[in-house]
Amino acid sequence: MWAGGIFAAGCALLAGVALLWAPRPAAPAPAPFHFRAVWIQDRAGMRDVHALGSDLYLMGMDSRRGGRERPLLRTPGRYCRPLLTDDGQTVVYSDRRTGGAHALRWGGRKPRFLGPGRALDTWTDPATKLVWVALGDGADPHPRLHRRIRLVRLDDPAIHRDLGLEFAVNENNFQFHDDGRLASGDRAGAGCGFVDLETGEWRQTADGCWPTMAPAGPPVVAVLQDGHRTLELVSVEDRRRIRIDAAAGIDPAAGEVFHPRWTNRRTHMALSGPYSAGTGRNRIGNGGPAVEIHLLEFTDDLAALRATYPITRNGFADFQPDIWIAPGD
């Protein structure tokens, strides 16, 4: 019996290794440019949309490496909110086990600890070209609210400064405009909008959830609405509003979308979907193996959806994407 138990355990271990390293089906050529993508994958319950569990994979893909989906770290863990720096060379992610943020060079296997807290966004100072990481303290009783946000330098985390916010914001999504002055956010009790980091002033732009900030050009905040199917894009300067059916190219029938995040290119946004399991509205919590990562392409004026590109194709649930697009492609 004891020998049989060892044999069974060995088979289970080999099966786990095979699951981790078995080749994934290559996604169809999803976009006519070089990109890198990172996301969280749930292979167990397939419904951990907020990445709160302990059996999650930190995933990545490079379109110039065959579009293969691969784990960036060898073992599953409590990973969440992966981000790509503006040059696409570094993955910044949070680990609920360590309670901190980590940096991993693309193609590397040895993460570097950046400090305690949750990584919310990365920002490259246009004047110095130094890369900073925004870390939320996570001290609020709500697991996704942060009352203190500090910037730490990617190359030297001992150098840091406090943003001095006087209110709590949801980590999904505190995202900088390229100029570093504005950031989108979901303020506790005050809806979605943006904060002026020079004055500390908060302005609400819309109800909804999961705001995201366009990286360049005239500032625009997008918010998910209408049962997680519609994106409302709001101009910061003149409050002009545009509504786009974000689910149209993914599941025009009943599927919902989630985790919208503007890429480093103004006309492109990453998100996950379709969320079609279950019935009724608000199917996000059901997750499911049909949930993949997609890339939206808007027209240059952000007035309409030009195309939707599939990024992943697998039998697991894929959440919390970030995508980097090579400049000039």
Image (tube, helix red, strand yellow):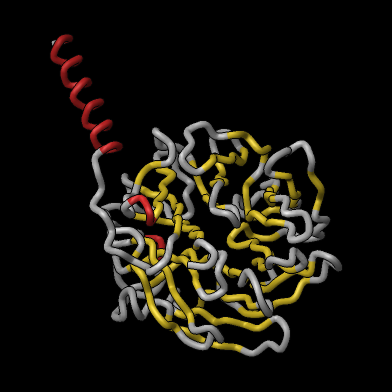
Quadrant occupied by the N terminus: top left
Q: Position of residue 224 (x, y in %)?
A: 51, 74
Residue farthest to the front, as pictured: 328
Q: Position of residue 19 (x, y in %)?
A: 25, 38
Q: Number of marks in the image?
A: 0
Q: Is residue 274 above or below residue 307?
A: above
Residue 239 vs residue 99, the one in the foreground: 239
Q: Position of residue 60 (x, y in %)?
A: 42, 49
Q: Is residue 145 above or below residue 113?
A: below
Determine the residue positioned at 52% across, 67% down.
328
Q: From the viewer's perspective, is 87 left or right of 204?
A: left
Determine the residue positioned at 28% across, 37% down.
21
Q: From the viewer's perspective, is 270 left or right of 45?
A: right
Residue farthest to the top, as pictured: 2
Q: From the viewer's perspective, is 210 left or right of 310?
A: right
The image quadrant that residue 97 belongs to is: top right
Residue farthest to the right, as pictured: 199
Determine the residue positioned at 31% across, 52% down.
66
Q: Position of residue 133 (x, y in %)?
A: 68, 49
Determine the residue positioned at 57% across, 73% down.
266
The image quadrant that residue 287 belongs to is: bottom left
